[in-house]
Image (tube, grey):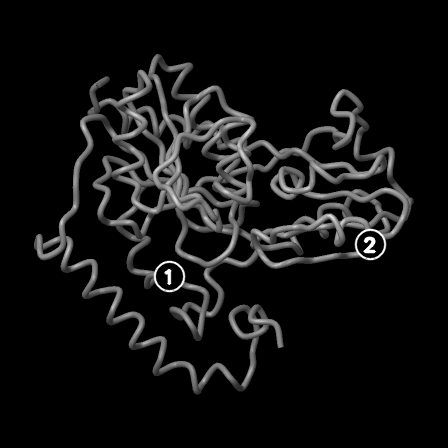
Amino acid sequence: MKIEALWYGRHWLFWPLVPLAGLFRLLVALRRLAFRRGWRRSERLPVPVIVVGNLTVGGTGKTPLVLWLADWLRDQGWKPGILLRGYRGTSSRWPRRVAVDDDPRELGDEAVLLARKSPAPVAAGPDRVAAGRLLLAGAACDILVSDDGLQHYRLQRDLEILVIDGGRGFGNGFCLPAGPLREPLSRARGIPLRLCSGGGCPDAEPLILQVGDLVNLRHPERTLPLASFRRRRVTAVAGIGNPERFFALLRREGLHVEELPYPDHHAFTAAEVAAWPPGPVLMTEKDAVKCLAFAGEDHWYLPVSAVPSVAFQRQLSQALKGLSHG
């Protein structure tokens, strides 16, 4: 049974897990109280911090939004830096500055993707406070953006942006393991800046995820519009939090898709890639970062960019007025 059937549908295994969800919720509340009361130490960095996060397990479009946010802040006169955990990175040394040629197996796929796509400096590490201090020591930043980390209360923040999956919402509304929530829904009420990926959420501004032309992994100068694969059979690879979103996008464009879903942040191997069917293989940009070293001639990735609503941009501008540059 896929866990999504439990979290986003109906399954009898839900009921035995409800007591565990209650225990998880209690532990989350106690942990947050410990930081609020000072029993556990949180730290404020010397520049403003914006955290982009979600309440559910899995992807909601946070990383494209972080890329957009870093560009938008630069256009407003700020000098942003980007922080993230470096999830699934195998490095024995944290925190780390992330370079465009770093190995995604060491620092995580999202960290390397952000470093390659944004001119803003990037630092990764499980301790966001330490990663922030490392970034500020070596780069001229006057504001920091944390990709994920809504629940990383050790890092004090000035603004929070909640990203919601418009297609799946908050699932059954229960915390882990009975539902997909990392924190109870009451947490969302304290976050005024909210975006809904795909639209359809009450009290949240729409976030459009806009696709670009397909890019060939072996020859990145070669690009093709997604429409050129219409009515063709393709293999679609996705090792992301919600692979069905990627597959559905391709089907909506008229492609005949053979789905190859993998776990989120899957570490692809050369043997796996060599075993893929011949013909066009389409994947997400996050997966392409990990497959670049052993990609075939007919392997392509689909870049995605975030486009928040104008109303959200006005809300963000208003929220930033109270913050000072460096």
Q: Nearer the viewer, residue 318 or 176?
A: 176
Circle 2 crowding by C-alpha within 10 Å: few under 14, some 14–19, many from 20: few
Point out the image quarter for the N terminus. bottom right
Q: Position of residue 234 (x, y in %)?
A: 85, 47
Distance of mark 1 from mark 2, alpha carbons? 36 Å
Query: What residue is pinned by disc 1?
Result: 182
Say which element carries label 1: loop
**Side of 238 where 171 appears, left or right:** left
The quarter holding residue 2 reads bottom right
Q: In percent of the image, x 57 and y 45: which residue is there?
A: 198
**Residue receiving disc 2:** 275
Label 1 or label 2, whichever lies nearer to me, is 2
In the depicted structure, whether residue 237 falls above or below residue 312:
below
Q: Amino acid at mark 2?
A: Ala
Q: Does residue 315 lie above or below 236 as drawn?
A: above
Residue 136 at x, y percent in the picture: 27, 24
In the rendered image, residue 9, in percent from the top left (x then y), is placed at: 57, 73
